[in-house]
Amino acid sequence: MAEKVLMKGNEAVAEAAIRAGCRHYFAYPITPQSELIEYMAKRMPQVGGCFLQAESEVAAINMVFGAAACGVRVMTSSSSPGISLKQEGISYIAASRLPAVIVNVQRGGPGLGNIAPMQCDYFQSTRGGGHGDYYTPVLAPSSVQEFADMAAEAFRIAERYRTPVLIFADGMLGQMMEPVVFEDDYGPTADSSEWALGNRSQTKRQNHIVNSLFIDPYELKEKTEKLFEVYDEIRKNEVRYEMYNVDAGPKYLAVATGTAARVVKTAIDELKDQGIEIGLVRPISLWPFPYEAVAAAARGVKRVFTIELNMGQMVEDVRLAVAGSSPVEHIGKAGGVVFTPVETINLLRERCQ
Amino acid sequence: MRLIAKRPEGLTKTRLTYCPGCLHGVAHRIIAEAMDELGITDRTIGIAPVGCAVFAYNFFSCDMIQSPHGRAPAMATGIKRARPDCVVFTYQGDGDLAAIGTAEIVHAANRNEKIAVFFVNNAIYGMTGGQMAPTTLPGMKATTAPYGRDVEDTGYPIRVCELLSTLKMTYYVERVSLLSPKEIIKAKKAVKKALKYNAEGRGFTLVEMISTCPTNWGMDPLKSREWARENMLPVFPVGVFRDRGTEKEPAISEKKAS
């Protein structure tokens, strides 16, 4: 049986990525993800992997781009402003149909913001983020264990669909210590021999070209449509969410993800004792968003609350899902101020009157 | 009949997209010939830039990838780290390498990243239509320097070989020119040395090639070569700036910090 260890989220996801077969990691220091890059600096040489501190976020994502084109499991991590810098590269990686994993340990924004946990990169994460017509699958953990488990899951999705995958964490999940158990068997790297660079001398194949430039509009149209066929498959197969306290047909529904969902669960339990029933849908994949699950859970409820560590971003997806069948309200905070359980209980109790 | 010239195996049969009189074709050819002669094409990965050579992935017959603007040395780093047995080269113009990609080229050289960089300098942005480059000469006109480059306002041309050769670890840096058959033969020797050093896993190599842009300079090909000789070579002198392969003492002999 695997051993249970106490670790910070930033370290746990790094260890899990290594155990999942990631042997290439390129990043640039930024708070609150620095324990991740430091852990990789220490661990990668021990497993014969490549750790390189890049000169910038821009360089780091392009190192990821190059390594991904060779078919190896490669990861980078950063925090909000650094993820913004990586967006050009992420767009290229998506367009070039390459697998890679990007961890965003979000901090307060906009601008330099601060280093407190926020979920204010929701729009950027779920709407492509960079230039052009594309998406990246987004996984949002709400515990250190889930953060760690998502490393292997992100690589699996990335390789199956040949797409960059984003892990949407925050400063709280990155810095917090919790018990975690690691799997050791995460499966082999997907076969990349049809497209990867540099494996030619053994196979005597034609040269491979990795490219995202299609100067003929009809060719770009066709390539983009192909990309969206892949996205249709992802929408069909990779929607993930957790339902909490929904079986008894609660009068109210909460939708919250990541760190916010943890606080909301505590509030739901407490309010249940006070006779107020609130169900929760916790989206785990933010793209593809669990529209159908939210719509089904919202059917017949008096009100839907979207609770976020921002000024109202996921609430737009919740409104799309609910499609007017119930009123949807946003409860959020800017600045990296995290709701306390008592505060959340009081806020929800007031709104359930 | 005796065969005296043929297409190198390192080039595909795709027609080049360059303007008449452009020297990119020459630069491509000498790189391809060098790959042929070293027998490394099937273990070489080339990186096309953004700029006139953006379609280079169609022209070289090795594995190819197209990079975001200026990021080729970072991408090459990722490729080399993933495929240490491959020879990895970037092909970059002056805007790509010395403006938007300045950080990436300096740090790749500083890490002595085991990649070859082919840097084509014609002192202008070609693909976008003749804008000022970081290597545009003082007083030289460009569409974004319509009164000529004013060094008080936009600085002096950046000399990449001089800059990179100050870095301790850089393995091999040479500037050549493509302005006559004699110079092209010399340029090919430099290109071949750069690739050979990389095939041997030695370190960072860069060959800067002084080139022309008849279209955006508004000159015919012969006149543009004369102009480059008279105006570019004094600012960008050819020569070997660094060759650790021939140095008696390795340049990195200092003690490690404890």
Image (cartoon, coloured by chain):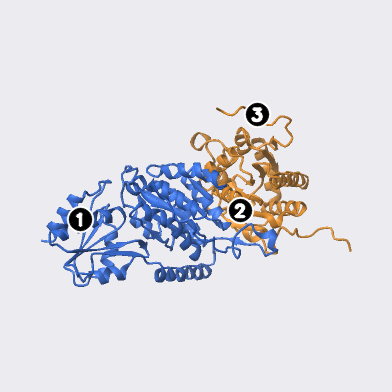
Q: Compared with residue A245, is residue B88 higher up or lower down, i.e. above or below?
A: above
Q: Compared with residue A249, is residue B65 higher up or lower down, i.e. above or below?
A: above
Name the residue beneath numbered marker 1. A267
Q: Which three-letter amino acid code belongs to the residue tagged 1? A: Ala
Name the residue beneath numbered marker 2. B47
Residue B71 rendering spot, x and y as whole percentages: 54, 49
Q: Which three-letter amino acid code belongs to the residue tagged 3? A: Ser
Q: Residues within 10 Å of mark 3 (few under 14, many from 20)?
A: few
* Element on which disc 2 rests: strand
Q: Chain of mark 3?
A: B
- Disc marking residue B253: 3
Name of the residue lying farthest toward the left:
A353
Q: Compared with residue A301, is residue B54 higher up or lower down, i.e. above or below?
A: above
* Residue at 54%, 40% in the rendered image: B149
Q: Nearer the viewer, residue A179 or A60?
A: A179
Residue B46 rendering spot, x and y as whole percentages: 63, 54
Marks 2 and 3 share the same chain = yes
Disc on the earlier residue, 2 or 3: 2
